[in-house]
Amino acid sequence: MPFTIKVNGTPHSVDVDDDTPLLWVLRDLLGMTGTKFGCGMALCGACTVHIDGQPVRSCITTIDSVGTSAITTIEAVGRTPAGQAVQKAWLDLEVPQCGYCQSGQIMSASALIADNPHPSDADIDGAMAGNVCRCGTYVRIREAIKQAAAANTNRKGG
Amino acid sequence: MSQQLIDHPAPQSPSRRDVLKVGLGTGGALFVVFGIPSIAKHFQQDTNIASIVTEAETAPFAPNAFIRIDRQGAVTLVMPMVEMGQGAYTSLAMLLAEELEVGLDQVKLEHAPPNDALYANAIFHRQLTGMSSSIRAFWTPLRQAGAVARTLLIAAAAKQWGVDPAVCSAKHGVVSAGSHQLSYGQLVDAAAALPVPTPDSLALKDPKDFTLIGTPAKRLDTPDKVNGHAEFGIDTKQPGMKVAAIAISPVFGGKPKSLDEAAARAVKGVRQVVRVDEAVAVVADHMGAAKKGLAAAAIQWDDGPNAKVSSADIVRQLEEASKQPGVMARNEGDTEKALASAAQRLEAVYQLPFLAHAAMEPMNCTVHLRKDGCDIWVGTQAPTLTQAVVAQLTGLPKDAVKIHNHLLGGGFGRRLDVDGSVLAVKIAQQVDGPVKVVWSREEDIQHDMYRPYYYDRLSAGLDAEGMPVAWTHRTSGSSVMARYDPPLFKNGLDPDAVEGAAEPPYAFPNIHVDYVRVEPPGIPTAFWRGVGPTHNIFVVESFIDELAHAAKQDPVAYRKTLLGHNPRALAVLTLAAEKAGWDRPLPSGRGRGVSVQFAFGSYLAEVAEVEVAANGSLKVHRIVCAVDCGMVVNPDTIEAQVQGGTFFGLTAALYGAITLKNGRVEQGNFDTYRPLRIDEAPVVETHLVKSSEAPGGFGEAPTAVVAPAVTNAIFAATAKRIRTLPILLKFPS
């Protein structure tokens, strides 16, 4: 059946079964390939997007559950203050290696920073443990989240 | 894979490229002569365009296969090796840019097309990215390529100004002499008209004059990996493209027996159901429909001859085979005699499991097969092999098979094999138009080609002072080399299976190392990040720790005694021990372990600090790594590889195991084939030894060194010796 979803501020109409995962609508029908497929079972976080600011795994989020919520993907997360701070920290600290999981890492980290301006190590563990990186960029992910949090706080303060 | 598909062109001298050079030419001429592709990589930020865009490149100046400069001064560097996270695209570009005298901000990169004659890795004589060889293979050729281009641009400027080239200098894409200045773009036509010097005739920069090599230059691929624009093979978009989900026989060698095609086709968006020998594909408008259709097809399988294979049988087969002598890899002195007269004798069996690669980007390949040609969009470590195999399969000439390579969402050796492209082409043979075949995570893990199971027997004799007088090591397992590169499998010896075993860094007066080849039924084997050393360093560094314990000596001190002849290994060991605070006391339940490694041309020593709680739970707290990898191209990349390689190796050491039951792989996704996660990741410290030695390989080195450091630390904490990986067989979480 037809659905109209709002992705990065723009409405898109697709005609698919109601149990179609949002991931494949984004990637295969809307051509937004920044959101990645990794496991299909919400085990790796590569497909993370924001729905109304909350991080969700798009591989198990069916299209009929999205309604009129605002979907944000890696392609537009840089328009949010937290997303911008996280992307800058990722660049500054050279976080990515192969890069495939990093869209999901950045989406999870952005949601964390937006929600929690001063995440502790335990907060970072809690928010990021669902995102797998096989290249093992975890040391730099942790450092970059701390840098982004500091930058985000400073900017808000100034 | 059949043997004849692998070309082994003779090693070429750099001057071979002179024969292929063109003078003033058009892009069209370059296509003819070099086959340079039209896929160009641009670095553009703050746009919605991915950094890899298709563009017909024309460049008047192309003095070799690696460099093109256009009249606007845009510099394109063609990357002969692939980028899979290890940083090769930045480090190789740094080698070219250093001698070309351009900044990294001035260059764009391009994936090399398949061409062994132009882009072969000098270590393999083939265009393969693997064995941590990129920098070692291209350290000289790419600097020479840059020097050739710079020499021609300077000569063109000097001629125009009527001055001696010796008074001219080049910097950041501009040639200067006194008040004269011309940009590279202004010089390309004149430079292209000059005879190309022999690369060997040019003096390369003295390392003390390097301005780029040795600096922590920013990676060229990072911006697009942060904004979602990086294009991996799985991101390919072609007009009219369909996507396909696949199910491969759950038992290797099995076949689909029956399926409900009508049910699959009834799913909205499904276009076609395709059967090939070992698999079923459902082709659809999107992967949601394809997967739903595949589930609806309710495929029944004929399991074939491997239906009863189990891990236990494979291990029994190895155990039995390893009782007989193998093919000798090294024999010095007389180990039998030395063992007979030793004051103390030790024996041990070590076992390492099958491992899957589980790259984050699942296997995928997009194919557009036509009567007269075939386009392949894929991320591969072996582009020429892919082209050869597809040409054989389709009956097309190689030139009609275009390989559009991509960034790899992890390689780890998995993408050295071309089974994914072969399957996609077989499916595409029944599909009209381009089709993207994407494997599920379960297919990716259950139809991987696995790091072999190894079964190793060791013995050692110690003298009255506890020092080794004899060392024997027999490794048994599948030969990946015999399948992948048969000419390197000589006289029954697989050099990869014994790498790290045949040449341990320690001084043993009598040493015997041999190899027993045992091919397990029903499970294909392949290279896995760290290859031979990932297996053998664990075994050697664990057993040497056993020797130290038997000798009642400190593990670091014992190793130092045996490394007197090996100053670089001794130096990294000393540095790692010092930085880790080896002699500082630890609370009860904690332990430190050490390992030392020489592999891929680099020396590493690592100290792990672990804690085993009263309930048996294990936590790795800290890893300290000392590195001497010779001259460093990019120290930030070295640090990143220490961090990442350590976690890749630690994941396998702690959790990694592929097991078989009734011919089926028992693991399927990240719940059963468990990766290390951020909350389990220890602190990792990297300490570099300054070195002027030739650069060593590094993408795999840290993967190998970590496991024995951790198991030796567990022994220090608990007196439990881990001889079979993964560790969590003994320490369940």
Image (cartoon, grey):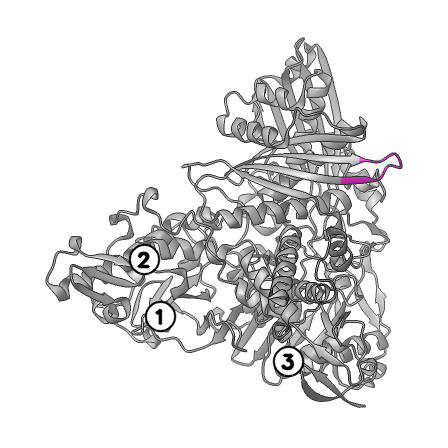
**Chain under numbered label 2:** B
- Disc sitting over residue B422 in the figure: none
Instruction: Report the side of B511 relative to A123 (left or right).
Output: left
Closest to the observer, B268 or B183: B183
Q: In the rendering, at what x and y percent does residue B372 appear?
A: 51, 80
Q: Nearer the viewer, mark 2 or mark 3?
A: 2
Badge 1 amino acid: Ala
User: What's the amino acid at mark 2?
Assistant: Glu
Instruction: In the displayed orientation, state which residue is furthest to the left.
Output: B162
Residue B616 falls inside the magenta stretch? yes
Instruction: Say which residue appears at 57% left-offset and 58% top-offset.
Output: B84
The residue at which mark 3 appears reads as A31
Front in this rendered view, residue B450 or B162: B162
Residue B74: which disc?
Answer: 1
Callout 3: helix, strand or loop?
Answer: loop
Asked if badges 1 and 3 are on one and the same chain, I answer no
Alpha carbons under labels 2 and 1: distance apart: 13 Å
* Residue in the foreground of this view, choosing between B466 and B365: B466
Q: Name the residue beneath numbered marker 2.
A: B101
Seen at 76% across and 60% down, the residue is A127
Q: Main secondary structure of the magenta part?
A: loop
Judging from the image, mark 1 belongs to the subunit labelled B
**Vertical arrangement, residue B290 with respect to residue B62, above or below:** below
- Does B148 sit left or right of B469 as displayed? left
Which is more N-terminal, label 1 or label 2?
Answer: 1
The quadrant of the picture occupied by the N terminus of chain B is bottom right
C-alpha gap between disc 2 and disc 3:
39 Å
Which residues lie in the magenta part?
A: B612-619
Write the residue at 84% across / 48% down.
B310
How far across and down, in percent of the image, does residue B453 sit? 73, 43
Q: Amino acid at mark 3?
A: Gly
